[in-house]
Structures are given as C-alpha cells and as structure tokens.
Amino acid sequence: MDPSDSSMHRMSRSRRGEGGFTLVELVAVMVLAGILAAATFPALGSIAAAKAAGVQRQIQRDLTFARERAVNTGVRTWVVFDVQGNSYSVLAEPEGSPGRANAAVISDAATGRMYRIGLGNEAGASLVSANIAGASEVGFDWRGRAVTSGGVSLSAAGVVTITGGKTVTIRPGSGLATIP
C-alpha cells in the first residue's frame, strides 16, 4: 500500500487523536501520588502535636496572667480547671469579700467576654488532668505565690497535663507557670 493512501492516512491520524494514557504516564502519576501520601501522613501527626503545644502555651500564659493580675491589683486571682468539661476559667475575689467561695469569673479585657477557655474538640488537644495540691484549682496572692483553695501556699509543684504528655508546672513558692 502506498503511504499516501488517504484511508490509511485517516486511520493513523484518528488513532493518534484518541485520548488516553500510556502505561508510563499512569505509573508516573501513581509514583507521584505515593510520594505525596508518604509526605502527608507524618505531617498529620505533627499537626496534633503542634495543637497540643499551642494549648500548653495558652494555659501557661493564662496562669501567668492570673499571677500578674493578683500582684498588680492586690486581689487574689484563681484559675479553675474543669477536666471533664475540657475547659478552665480565671476568677477573682471581690474586694471587701475575700475567699475562694466568693470568687467570680472575670472579663477578658481584650474581648469583653467572660474568661472561660473551652478547648473543645476542634483544638485537637484536651485537658488530661490538673493536680494542684490534690485539687484542680490554683490561686495567686498579692505576692504572686500559688495557693490552695484553703489559702495555704503550695508546698509541691502543681501539674496540668494536656493530650500528648504535654504539661504545665506551677512552682511552689514563686507561683511561676513553666513548660518543661
């Protein structure tokens, strides 16, 4: 047959014009998809760890805020952890009516909302435990010292534990909140 034959020419042209992928192209796409999947799975674990570390830092900041507020105002300030509710609140005793029983949740100066921090499921991290002299709350006196609900200075460190083994430690004496 003559290559210039029009029917042969049309047939080869139509075959080249058909859509489809070669085996090499399909293998290349599968290899790329595998590489992307391998890179994504470890990143998912690091996202959860980063969220837990963020919650850890937030708790440390809020404990530090409560301590500094007590020093600046001379009014005892409390942080009360609700492990079951996966939240905590910052409270202050009213002037002229001291005592933990009279303390009320304060307003966040930045937002005007009540200072209740709900970690929720979307945070990816939750409170595991709060052990501060056998309780789940800590107060700070006008000197910044950490105290129990009975008003006694902490004799041992208080520890708040977050998902992933992250902790915040409240030092006896100084009341400083630290992250190991």
Image (spheres, rainbow, N blue to C red):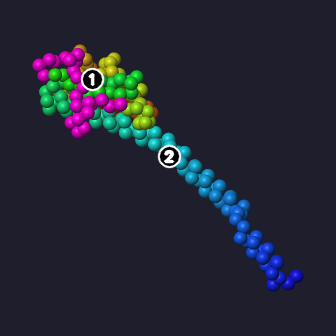
Q: Nearer the viewer, residue 20 or 91?
A: 20
Three-letter code for the amino acid on which mark 1 is drawn: Val
Question: Which numbered dot is residue 138?
Answer: 1
Badge 1 marks a residue whose secondary structure is: strand
Where does the N terminus fall, quadrant-wise? bottom right
Q: Is residue 8 left or right of residue 135?
A: right
Drawn side of residue 124 relative to residue 65, left or right: right
Q: Is residue 57 left or right of residue 42?
A: left
Where on the picture, by quarter, is residue 138? top left
Q: Is residue 83 left or right of residue 138?
A: right
For residue 78, say whether it is visible: yes
Residue visible at 16% across and 22% down in the picture: 94
Is residue 113 found inside the magenta-colored segment of the image?
Answer: yes
The disc labelled 2 sits on which kind of residue?
Ala
For label 2, count other residues whose C-alpha is less than 10 Å away and answer few (under 14), some (14-19) or many (20+). few
Q: Position of residue 3 (x, y in %)?
A: 82, 83
Nearer to the camera, 80 or 115: 115
The number of numbered badges drawn on the structure is: 2
Across and down, in percent, residue 131 comes to 35, 22
First in sequence: mark 1 vs mark 2: 2
Question: Farthest residue toward the right?
Answer: 1
Give the magenta part as a residue range: 95-118
Q: CA distance from mark 1 to mark 2?
A: 36 Å
The structure residue drawn at horizontal position 14% and vertical position 30%, both measured from the top left corner, is: 73
Q: Residue at x 37, y 36 (%)?
A: 55
Q: Position of residue 31 (x, y in %)?
A: 64, 56
Quadrant where the image shows the C terminus: top left
Indicate yes or no whether the magenta region holds residue 22.
Answer: no
Disc 1 to disc 2: CB gap under 8 Å: no
User: To which residue does mark 2 refer?
Assistant: 43
